[in-house]
Image (cartoon, grey):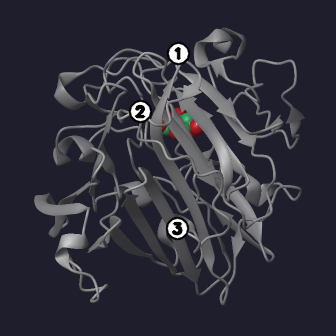
Amino acid sequence: MAGCQNNPGKQTSDIKMNLTKELYGEVDGKEIFQFTLKNENGITVKLINYGGIVTHLLVPDKNGKTEDVVLGYDNLPQYLGDTPYFGAIVGRYGNRIAKGEFELDGTAYKLATNNGPNHLHGGVKGFDKVVWDAEEFVFPEKAGVILNYLSKDGEESYPGNLDVKVTYTLTNKNELKINYEATTDKATVVNLTHHSYFNLKGQGNGDILDHHLQLMADRYIPVDQALIPTGELREVKASAMDFTTPHSIGSRIAKVDGGYDHTWAVNDFDGKKIRLAAKVTEPKSGRMMEVYTDQPGVQFYTGNFLDGSLTGKQGKAYNKHSGFCLETQHYPDSPNQPDFPSVVLRPGEKYETGTVYKFGIEEEGNRCRGKASCMLEHSSAYSVIGDW
Ligand code: BGC
């Protein structure tokens, strides 16, 4: 449905967005396409319907110079090989479930243990490794792709046929919006997220330790050696986890065993409201990214397990800390933590959540309103899903 069929009143000339689609390869006899979305301000997003992977995200800097700010690969065969979830949709349960075990309505479920003793990111073949059906759309101020996947009852040992829809939308306000929806025919657990590794200097241009981060979170979730929550929500105050005011990522990372790989409990969670969760700036380029979500948490991961062994786009080697992830989600191991917000989805209910990655320019701590190079039109809040 490329074009303007969904908006018959509009003339083609009103359309400020651009969307193209190219064959990218084939998996299991199914065609994989790469969709290219462009807005008027020089932002380009490329994504594929294998794993729902965002392969490229081009963003101008304060001088209008564009860089690709996500890590990834140049072609499909590489994505079919070893990848630490570059750019992918992660599910059915993003993050870890201790020992791969949980109980729901009196039935014990045993999932794959694909991360030491624990279950990680949906198992051996999670949503990052499946082919999604895809349908594109273009409106005057936004364009995107709707991805659909039916995860069968018993897939990766999860209960229930889960009908999943993920919509990626690029807007003319420099937002990449991700809307997740799901329904089930049996009680199950769901926690979907997106796994882009960002580097606002451009992928392969060094590490992210000099980026400045602010997290709108007074508490985080301490974990054990295997990164399973202890059950506590701890105040960040006076610790290396305190990003309530902006800090460079590298300034205190040495105090955190292994680097940052934790969930922060984003303030002001009410299950509905989309609020600012994180803001990252890269001082030299001026690029800025804000993350808005309705989810209770955000996993901030500093690419600690990247070790230079993966060669990414344009032959760039990805070393430790060459990208960071901000994965909006429920807390890890929620199926086993009665005090954490519930991740159970039941027949008749609808799982519906939204996250926005919004790009702009910030120079020396000041918003550059009025400058030609400044793309940002700051929007302080998204009230509820559907509002956007
Ligand atoms: C996790 C890391 C994990 C990585 C996989 C992140 O979401 O928090 O612990 O290694 O995904 O690449």
Q: Are marks 2 and 1 in contact (CB under 8 Å)?
A: no
Q: Nearer the viewer, mark 2 or mark 1?
A: 2
Q: Earlier in the sequence, mark 2 or mark 1?
A: 1
Q: Quadrant of ligand 1?
A: top right
Q: Give the Cα distance between marks 1 and 3.
A: 30 Å
Is the residue 153 above or below the residue 100 in the image?
Answer: below
Q: Amino acid at mark 1?
A: Leu
The residue that disc 1 covers is 209
Q: Are marks 2 and 3 in contact (CB under 8 Å)?
A: no
Is the residue 310 above or below the residue 185 in the image?
Answer: above
Q: Residue 326 bears which disc, if any?
A: none
Query: Label 3 CB, ligand 1: below 8 Å?
Result: no
Q: Residue 225: x, y in percent?
A: 72, 27
Q: Residue 371 bears which disc, if any?
A: 2
Q: Earlier in the sequence, mark 1 or mark 3?
A: 3
Is 246 on the left or on the right of 34, as rendered?
right
Measuring 37% from the left and 14% from the top, which residue is drawn there?
Answer: 206
Is the residue 299 above or below the residue 209 in the image?
Answer: below
| Residue 188 found in image quarter | bottom right
Q: Give the Cα distance between marks 2 and 1.
A: 28 Å
Measuring 75% from the left and 24% from the top, which residue is drawn there?
Answer: 241
Measuring 55% from the left and 67% from the top, which residue is drawn there?
Answer: 157
| Residue 350 found in image quarter | bottom right
Q: Earlier in the sequence, mark 2 or mark 3?
A: 3
Residue 125 seen: no
Q: Are marks 1 and 3 in contact (CB under 8 Å)?
A: no
Q: Amino acid at mark 3?
A: Tyr
- Depth order, front residue of 23/171: 171
Q: Residue 180 bears which disc, if any?
A: 3
Disc 2 is placed on an element classified as: loop
Mark 2 surroundings: few (<14), some (14-19) or many (≥20) residues within 10 A: few
How many circles with numbers are drawn on the protein? 3
